[in-house]
Amino acid sequence: MIGAQGENLGVIPLSQALNRAHEEGLDLIEISPNAKPPVAKIMDYGKFQYAENKKLKAQKSKAHVTEVKNVQIKIGTGEHDMALKAKKASDWLKDGNRVKIDLFLPGRSKYLDFKFLKERLERIMRLITVEYKIADEPKKSPKGLTVIVEKGR
């Protein structure tokens, strides 16, 4: 057990620890329940909750959430438009996001040769300036052909 000022009070029975906390007008909080014997501390429960919430908020602010950004092209997309979309994809990859590249296939173009469609998808991937790796291989989707890329190491 740990006292209100942080002093080590040693191993004491639960009833004695509860009485001691009640005498000081504070709460008995179990800090590490899995330890042998469990570690408890005498302190104000409100302050304890506040400190825990502060730690959680600090952890959340440091965590970087990766988003999946989307770029959509068609078979007949021009080189200039392709370059603009590749530049945008490069910016997103620099920021650490994943990029999903969709080759949109309207109507009958869904039934074209897979190698031909894959080559069309690789056209935009050649224009991406950032080093990347393919997270999800090109595969057929309801809209057409889809590949997911992420920042290379």
Image (cartoon, rainbow, N blue to C red):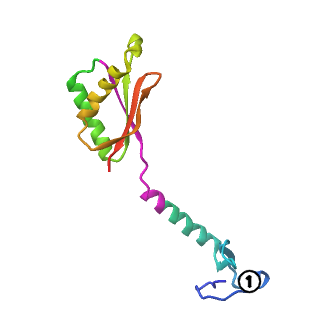
Of residue 97 and residue 9, the one placed in the foreground of this image is 97
Q: x%, y% of residue 124?
A: 27, 30
Q: x%, y% of residue 34?
A: 67, 71
Residue at x-position 38% and y-position 13%: 109
Residue at x-position 34% and y-position 25%: 118
Q: Quadrant of residue 33?
A: bottom right
83 relative to 58 in the view: left or right: left
Q: Is residue 73 magenta?
A: yes
Above or below residue 1? Residue 74 is: above
Q: Quadrant of residue 45?
A: bottom right
Judged from this view, the residue extending furthest toward the right is: 15
Which residue in the protein does label 1 denote?
17
24 relative to 89 in the view: left or right: right
Of residue 129 and residue 56, the one placed in the foreground of this image is 129
Q: Amino acid at mark 1?
A: Ala
Q: x%, y% of residue 108?
A: 40, 10
> Which residues are the magenta region?
58-75
**The N terminus sits in image quarter:** bottom right
Of residue 118 and residue 95, the one placed in the foreground of this image is 118
